[in-house]
Image (cartoon, rainbow, N blue to C red):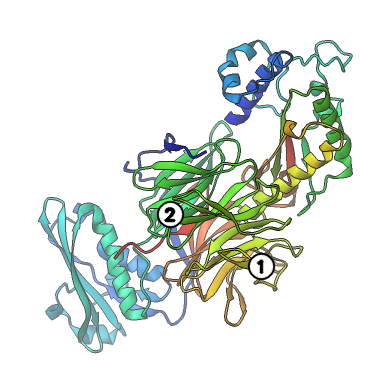
Amino acid sequence: MIKRIISFLLLANLSVNTYAVLDITITQGIEEALPIAIVPFQWQGQPNDLPVTMHLTIANDLARSGRFRTMDAGDMPQTPSQFNQINFADWRLLGMENIVIGNIRQTGTGQYDIEFRLINVYSGEQVSGFRIPASRDQLRRTAHRISDIVFEKLTGVRGAFDTRIAYITVKPTPDGDKVHTLQVADADGFNPQILLESNEPLMSPAWSPDGKMIAYVSFESRNSAIYIQDILTGARQMVASNPGINSAPSWSPDGTRLALTLSKEGDPEVFILNLATRNLIRITNNRAIDTEPTWSPDGSSLLFTSDRGGSPQIYQVSSSGGTARRMTFEGNYNSRARYSPDGSSITMVHNNGGGFRIATLDLANRFVHVLTTARLDESPSFSPNGSMIIYATTRGRGTELAAVSSDGRVHQRLGLQDGDVREPEWGPFPPQ
Amino acid sequence: MITRLIFITSLTVILTACSSTSERGDSAAVEDRGNASGSSSTSGSESGSATTFGTGTDARSGMSALDDPTSPLSVRILYFDYDSSEVLPAYREVLEAHANYLVQNPNITISLEGHADERGSREYNLALGERRSQSAKRHMMLFGPASSQIRATSYGEERPIADGHNDEAWSQNRRVEIIY
């Protein structure tokens, strides 16, 4: 049953693909955002010689988190690039607490050194500083890494700007058909790359814990089937194609197993598939719908959605099977749970009469916090540092991505020019 | 809908050959596509091809029961109430007619494609769609077709008929499609 095939639908992963960049708008920030100035990095060459404007990318990252208020370059009293050029009094007068300065040097053909310093204006001291060598292609990523360092130094939380998201797009074609794609992009929406294109639906992208593979559901064979695909090479294999539903793949934290939903025995049940041995273990056994499994960060248990109590609710079961325990009691609809990276809370689709919204459930005190206000929100996914939740929201003009801080205070919209964008899944941290 | 067209084409071939063979491999049927070109198949239409089925159940010459607009067999979409997989009374006669047709044509197989509206999570809706197609299949089984003649599948909310985000669109999208 396992076919190893090269994805014939794969569009060249390495092809230059500039269309459909996500456009991010912060719709709601917080009052006490930390003021910071990212001074334009000194660069001896022509301004247009670099594919990325470092200070703008960093400033956009930090502003997007909602935790920082960035200063426009035009409002800056000076644009120092070295520590000894900084006039601290001028910055203090403006109430600026932190500034980032830097410079870019070309060290060879397509090779650069990026040096940056994070400086506390009040103490007059350097908080952090690094020199990072980068090729031309790595410059944008380097900017995200600098954002990560600044974010961690000033908030105490590891930054998640140098990460990627996967999502599904759907676009109508002139002949009335629809084109479905599976894409990955940087967390700020740049560098979108198509991994798969199909005129049949695609669903449920799921990152492997090492960020190298994506599992997903494709209907290309006129029924749902689960595939796993290597992001770099595009090689893929089908791992489940039984009669009935084959869906909802979720990788175990150690990457060796997939939790999934199969209805081959009559109704949807949660199974665990060992990817090396192909051994399949049935986890649930109930005549109701059991689906949408997701692993706890320690791999010991699964959450899943079941309507065994009458309405869809979240249940927890040991990853070796056994009795399931109901987790949600507030609201007549709770589904598609995802754990926060530290395992202290879960996010889910929640309806308590007002619409389908993104909520979190604190596992310690059982408090349900509804984070969004629209009526058709779905597919929440935590950033790997737990600070944001990305999700899909449907309005009159279609479905687009949005994000909310996990405390519900910062909201942002990630709009794409045309077509629907949905099922965002935030990828893991890159290897350090 | 390319796959649907292929399916219709392959069905045409199956039907052309069904009196003499029990082989219904899709790939073989698709390769034999040319055989079907003589029929006036209607591209993209849910009503299937215009091939004569030769069941003798319809008095009008040259028209099969499946294509008779006055027959319950012409109904190919069943709609459902919100969050329900119960076959509404209005469709019981339709399913009975299709079931009887399968009994009379034991070489024919159909797909029941379950669909859901967009509200709620996608994977849960995939399960809801399957519950609808299985409910329709169970109803048909009362009238005696072989279980292997009816394939119950689900597309969840992934293939809406209506793209709107309101009650009217949702009521059109909660459905089971009968695909010959």
Q: Quadrant of residue B78?
A: top right
Residue drawn at the location 63% of the way across and 46% of the way down: A245
Coordinates of residue A352 in the picture (x, y in percent)? 70, 69
- The answer to whether the residue labelled 2 contacts the one labelled 1, judged by CB atoms less than 8 Å apart, is no
Q: Which residue is mark 1?
A: A323
Coordinates of residue B106 in the picture (x, y in percent)? 78, 24
B93 displayed left or right of A191: right
Residue drawn at the location 28% of the way across and 58% of the way down: A140
CA–CA distance in space, label 2 to label 1: 43 Å
Query: In the rendered image, which quarter contains the C terminus of chain B?
Result: top right
Which of label 2 and label 1 is nearer to you?
1
Q: Is residue A55 above or below residue B172?
A: below
Residue drawn at the location 24% of the way across and 71% of the way down: A39
B159 displayed left or right of A14: right
Q: Which residue is mark 2?
A: A22
Give the number of the disc on residue A383: none
Disc 2 packing (10 Å; few <14; some 14–19; many ≥20): many
As helix, strand or loop, the secondary structure at mark 2 comes to loop
Residue B109 visible to the viewer: yes
Residue B116 visible to the viewer: no
Residue drawn at the location 60% of the way across and 52% of the way down: A261
Query: In the rendered image, which quarter contains the N terminus of chain B?
Result: top right
B168 displayed left or right of A239: right
Q: Are marks 2 and 1 on the same chain?
A: yes
**Amino acid type assigned to the residue bearing label 1 in the image:** Thr
Quick one: A71 or B121, which is closer to the camera?
B121
Q: Is residue B97 above or below residue B115?
A: above
Disc 1 packing (10 Å; few <14; some 14–19; many ≥20): few
